[in-house]
């Protein structure tokens, strides 16, 4: 009898223990998930900043590379202008007929005793700004020279450029040389390269075939194809 009562009490005691209801897994400790979300957002912010810095750095690299090509183009273009002057003087500096008609004549040089004097380097005969690498030859009667005179007039504050003494005869051939009125005109660069034909006759200067805006300015000019390298005013 006593054993039965004790067993009943034990059974009752075991059944009377309070049950524990555990929270769902996602409510157990919300902090790790919250920290994970913060870490993910921080990572996305850092990656976005790195992408922006990389884009800015790439833009600066491209701009610097273009600047270096422009410096080289000016260096080579002015060498071509010096070669035109040397050739013109060798031919007697007697007007249009004393000008070269192609780049090869400048590369051949001019006689100096029993030898030939090199007046133009092979590298300078190439335009570093255009894909073709070919300079555009500019004749003295070309409208491009009128644009150059206009730009130089603006650059000097309204005073038209003065031709060198040995080129004064050729300066009279330039369109609107003595009547520069539109000193505020600008052209938007279309991009790409100019594939039009060069001057078919004597030329007094060269220009790049690149129709792009420049990083540098050359006497205030901000387009590659409007940089005319000529001995006329140098």
Image (cartoon, helix red, strand yellow):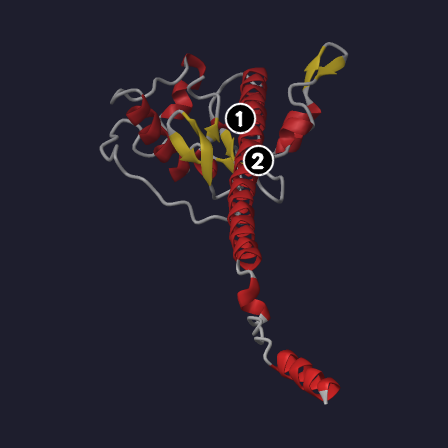
- Position of 156 with respect to 131 (left or right) is left
Name the secondary structure under disc 2: helix
- The residue under the point 26% across, 30% down is 180
Q: Position of residue 177 (x, y in %)?
A: 31, 28
Which callout, 1 or 2, points to the residue nearer the camera? 2
For image coordinates 38% across by 39% down, the residue present is 143
Q: Residue furthest front?
A: 1
Name which residue lies at 37% across and 27% down: 220
Q: Position of residue 120 (x, y in %)?
A: 65, 22
Residue that label 2 marks? 61
Quarter-of-image position of residue 140: top left
Q: Could you tell me if residue 141 is visible in this image?
A: no
Label 1 sits on residue? 74
Residue at horizontal 53 percent and vertical 35 percent from the top:
60
Report x, y in % for residue 196: 51, 49
Mark 1 vs mark 2: which is more N-terminal? 2
- Residue 30 coordinates in the image, percent (x, y): 53, 60
**In this picture, is 32 found above or below 53?**
below
């Amino acid at each position: 009898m006593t054993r039965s009562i004790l067993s009943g009490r034990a059974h009752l005691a075991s059944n009377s223990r309070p049950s524990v209801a555990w929270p769902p897994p996602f409510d157990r400790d919300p902090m790790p998930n919250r920290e994970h979300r913060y870490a993910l957002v921080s990572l996305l912010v850092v990656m976005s900043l790195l992408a922006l810095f990389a884009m800015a750095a790439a833009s600066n690299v491209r701009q610097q590379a273009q600047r270096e090509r422009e410096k080289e183009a000016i260096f080579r273009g002015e060498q071509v202008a010096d070669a035109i002057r040397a050739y013109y003087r060798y031919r007697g500096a007697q007007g249009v007929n004393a000008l070269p008609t192609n780049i090869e004549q400048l590369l051949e040089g001019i006689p100096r005793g029993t030898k030939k004097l090199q007046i133009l380097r092979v590298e300078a005969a190439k335009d570093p700004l255009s894909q073709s690498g070919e300079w555009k030859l500019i004749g003295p009667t070309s409208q491009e020279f009128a644009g150059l005179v206009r730009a130089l007039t603006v650059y000097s504050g309204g005073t038209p450029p003065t031709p060198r003494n040995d080129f004064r005869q050729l300066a009279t051939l330039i369109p609107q040389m003595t009547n520069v009125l539109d000193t505020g005109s600008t052209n938007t660069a279309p991009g790409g390269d100019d594939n039009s034909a060069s001057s078919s006759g004597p030329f007094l200067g060269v220009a790049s075939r690149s129709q792009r805006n420049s990083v540098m300015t050359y006497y205030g000019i901000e387009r590659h194809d409007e940089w005319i390298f000529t001995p006329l005013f140098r």
